[in-house]
Amino acid sequence: LRQASTCMERVDPHLCNNPGLVSRLVDWETSWEVGARYVRDAPLLDGICDVVSEVRAAQQVAPALTLMCEDCDVELFLVLPRMVILLFVADPGQQRANLVRNLLPHRFAEAGPKSAEEGSVPTRSCPDLIALSELYQAVLTELASVHPAAAAHAAPKEAAWQVLVKRAIKGDSDGSPKHNATDEEKLSSCPSATRRHVEDFMLGLERWSLELQRHCPQDWNQCSAVLVQCITRTMKTKTSSKKFQI
């Protein structure tokens, strides 16, 4: 664009006859749309940063997630929405709620009058999301009391959280490969009732994961691209096949 500004007399009046310039303008428009949504909106940007920080922490717990991110594995785009919902139900009061509310606005309702200081309207989750969050808390507490790794851990709930993170990354018990058989063996050593409760929670998590992807696929695709770029700390560059010309 800077190059074009120095030789405006050579720009064809018909924009379509300037393929290189058109290509750059399209890239600029796309970047501006992403920036307008995720950078200018401070609460939403905070939500993105919160999720990215937690996913990076999860990579330390589950190295398989790091490999997925580095390779942009197709499985990553099944895991990412699960992680977003898992993080939300784990602590709905954090900034990550802004991201979920933006992607699933119909699942939130106004909870009070507009705040004069923040200029925003407080919202509350729908009963189904609240129920999933309550189920999460119950499963976390149960795992913390019976899971072998949690029993030997200084912070049992932290160990239980790691179990749930690894389970969410693993996916369906019969549909995705086992990234860590040892973790599966440890979970299988828990009482059958606990394993059933974990699977019930994971089924609920998967349902919400699908809704997150399907409610507005275009919004989710754009959001997931931003998340992956932030998590991997890479700038997605597009090499145009068209020579820049005006």
Image: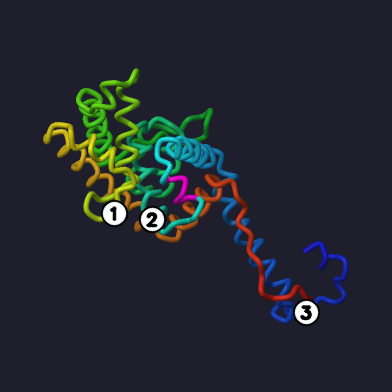
Question: Residue 209 colored magenta?
Answer: no
For the residue marked with disc 2, what is the amino acid? Answer: Glu
| Quarter of the figure with the N terminus | bottom right
The residue beneath circle 1 is: 176
Which color mode does the image show? Answer: rainbow
Say which label, 1 or 2, has the lower sequence index: 2
Q: Which mark is residue 13?
A: 3
Number of numbered discs visible in the structure rendering: 3
Q: Which mark is residue 75?
A: 2
Above or below 237: residue 62 = above
Above or below 149: residue 46 = below
Specify few, some or many for label 2: CA neighbours under 10 Å numbering under 14, 14-19, or 20 or more. some
Expressed as whole percent of the image width and height from the top left, the position of residue 237 reads 64, 59
Question: What is the quadrant of residue 124 in the picture?
Answer: top left
For the residue marked with disc 1, what is the amino acid? Answer: Ser
| Quarter of the figure with the C terminus | bottom right
Specify few, some or many for label 1: CA neighbours under 10 Å numbering under 14, 14-19, or 20 or more. few
Q: Which residues are magenta?
A: 65-69
Give the residue displayed 36% in from the left and 54% down from the top.
Answer: 78
Specify few, some or many for label 3: CA neighbours under 10 Å numbering under 14, 14-19, or 20 or more. few
Q: Which mark is residue 43?
A: none
Q: Is residue 117 left or right of residue 184?
A: right
Q: Select label 3 or label 1 by which is in front.
A: 1
The answer to which of 205 and 15 lies nearer the viewer is 205
Mark 2 residue element: loop
Give the residue displayed 57% in from the left and 54% down from the top.
Answer: 34
Question: What is the quadrant of residue 158 in the picture?
Answer: top left
Marks 2 and 1: in contact by CB < 8 Å? yes
Above or below 196: residue 17 = below
- Residues at marks 3 and 1, CA–CA distance in whole angstroms: 55 Å
